[in-house]
Image (spheres, rainbow, N blue to C red):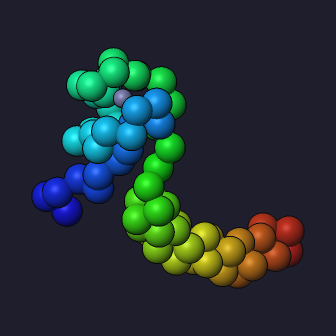
Amino acid sequence: MANPTPVKCPKCGTILDSRKSPCPACGYHGYIPMSDAQIKKIKLILYPIAIILAILAIVFIPRLFAS
Ligand SMILES: [Zn+2]
């Protein structure tokens, strides 16, 4: 978690330390797409949350209408 996933500048291809700071080589500071590793990490976090929310919805929504 200490090392941020390296991202490439979409304009010149330089490896950037952070998605938030502009490219040191060409100054690009627009949208920088997420790397595959970052997308994978986000999916690993979001999928269990989505499953838990779905289970909670299935369990609690019928109770709201029953009362
Ligand atoms: Zn650049």
Q: Can residue 41 be seen in this view?
A: yes
In the rendered image of this protein, does residue 41 appear above or below residue 9?
below
The single residue placed furthest to the left in the displayed view is 2
In the rendered image of this protein, does residue 63 appear above or below residue 29?
below
Q: Give me the residue at 82% from left, 76% from top.
A: 62
Q: Give me the residue at 48% from left, 24% from top.
A: 30
Q: Tell whether 51 sits left or right of 16.
A: right
Q: Is residue 60 visible?
A: no
Q: Give me the residue at 40% from left, 22% from top.
A: 29
The quadrant in which the N terminus is found is bottom left
Q: Tell whether 26 sits left or right of 40.
A: left
Q: Where is residue 45 in the image (x, y as percent from the top left)?
A: 45, 69
Q: Is 53 in front, or is 18?
A: 18
Give residue 13's quadrant in the image: top left
Q: Tell whether 65 sits left or right of 33.
A: right
The single residue placed furthest to the front in the displayed view is 12
In the rendered image of this protein, does residue 15 appear above or below residue 50?
above
Quadrant for ligand 1? top left
Q: Tell whether 39 sits left or right of 3.
A: right
The single residue placed furthest to the right in the displayed view is 65
Q: Where is residue 60 in the image (x, y as percent from the top left)?
A: 70, 74
